[in-house]
Image (tube, rainbow, N blue to C red):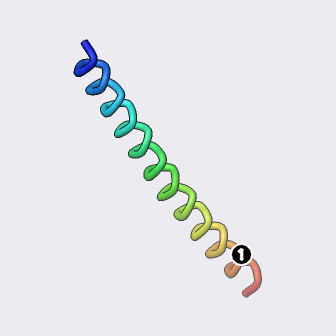
């Protein structure tokens, strides 16, 4: 039983980490696009 609980926690932790990484990547891309648009407006 404890082994199954540990496996479930590891799977959930992995999913949580992957979601965080995907969110970080999306935030970087949004920031890059905002900066790109700001430069277009200034030109």
Q: Which residue is mark 1?
A: 38
Q: Quadrant of residue 10?
A: top left
Vertical placement of residue 1 versus 18, above or below: above
* Helix, strand or loop at mark 1: helix
Q: Quadrant of residue 16?
A: top left
- Picture residue at 76% right of the left edge, 83% below the top: 42
Residue 25 rendering spot, x and y as whole percentages: 47, 58
Residue 12 rendering spot, x and y as whole percentages: 38, 30
Q: In the displayed structure, does residue 43 sit left or right of residue 17?
A: right
Residue 43 rendering spot, x and y as whole percentages: 72, 87
Relative depth, front residue between 9 and 34 = 9
- Picture residue at 44% right of the left edge, 52% below the top: 21
Q: Dividing the image into 4 quarters, which one contains the N terminus? A: top left
- Picture residue at 68% right of the left edge, 79% below the top: 40
Q: Quadrant of residue 35?
A: bottom right
Q: Outermost residue, front direction?
A: 2
Residue 19 rendering spot, x and y as whole percentages: 44, 43
Relative depth, front residue between 12 and 27 = 12
Q: Outermost residue, top direction?
A: 1
Vertical placement of residue 7 versus 23, above or below: above
């Amino acid at each position: 039983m404890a082994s199954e609980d540990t496996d479930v926690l590891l799977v959930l932790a992995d999913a949580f980490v992957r979601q965080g990484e995907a969110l970080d990547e999306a935030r970087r891309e949004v920031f890059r696009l905002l900066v790109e648009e700001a430069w277009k407006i200034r030109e």
